[in-house]
Amino acid sequence: MQNHPERREQLMKIALELYATNGYPATKVSSIVKRAGVAQGTFYWHFKSKKDIALAILKEGELALLQVIQEGYRKDVGTIDEMIASSTSLMTHLFTFAKEERYLMTLLFLTGHDADEEIIDLISKINKDLEDAFSRNIHRAQELGMLKSKSTEDLRASMLTSLVKGMMQRWLFHSDETTDSIHVMTPQTIAKEIVDFEFFGLLGKRID
């Protein structure tokens, strides 16, 4: 049997959708191959188990997610306005990615926590890597003199990560359409709100 990358990708895409919609425990290898229209032997040519394919999905998803954040890593010094524009662009790309990869976000935030311990550990690692990526961006801005250097760099990254994740979960999954307008926000709109809060706190605006 030949190793076809497109078949592997097909199986991963189908498995991710099933994990997101039905939950990890309820998803069987037989369900994945039935949806894909292939024999179980084809599945086991590419993956050892349903845990193995879940781990592959998460690792690939993490690389894509971190790439979005790394694109916001500054190379050169800039003004405050340029920092705000850069952060807004980063958040817009991040929330656009989350919307386009809703099944991945579902696995990370919701259904993956009922999975095997190894998968849960990987999800925890992804969350930590996400925070570390924000921390590197903050540290770089400090190196360039765009932010004051403080010993609370990791705390700031933790707070920013919590803000982004909390808004993302509410935006994608938990918004009450009868009382909450967040569900109709575009990635651009929600990015602006987050960045305004990130830079200006409860004031919501810059004071010159």
Image (spheres, rainbow, N blue to C red):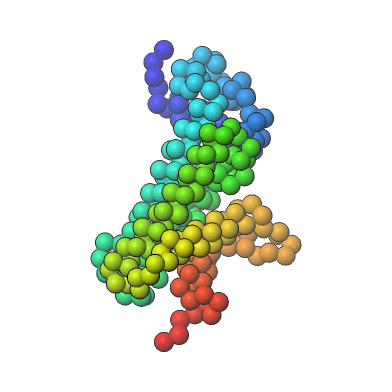
Tell which residue pokes out farthest to the right in this image: 178
- Relative to 191, say whether 202 is above or below: below
Task: Give the x, y percent position of residue 13.
Answer: 51, 33
| Residue found 41% across the figure and 87% down from its top | 208
Decide if residue 70 is on the left or right side of residue 102.
left
Camera-side residue: 191 or 120? Answer: 120
Please, is residue 9 above or below residue 185 in the view? above
Give the camera-side residue of 74 and 33. Answer: 74
Residue at image position (33%, 66%) is 141
The picture places residue 82, in percent across and down from the top left corner, at 34, 71
Q: Can residue 85 be seen in this view?
A: no
Quadrant in the picture for residue 149: bottom left
Q: Is residue 135 above or below residue 144?
A: above
- Locate residue 114, reporting x and y percent: 64, 37
Q: Which residue is drawn at 57% across and 34% down?
A: 117
Q: Residue furthest bottom?
A: 208
The residue positioned farthest toward the front in the image shown: 151
Which quarter of the figure has residue 168? bottom right
Would residue 41 be seen by someone viewing this image from the given angle? yes
Say which residue appears at 40% left-offset and 59% top-offset.
135
For the N terminus, the quadrant is top left
Residue 5 percent coordinates (x, y): 40, 26
Total marks in image = 0
Q: Quadrant of residue 107?
A: top right
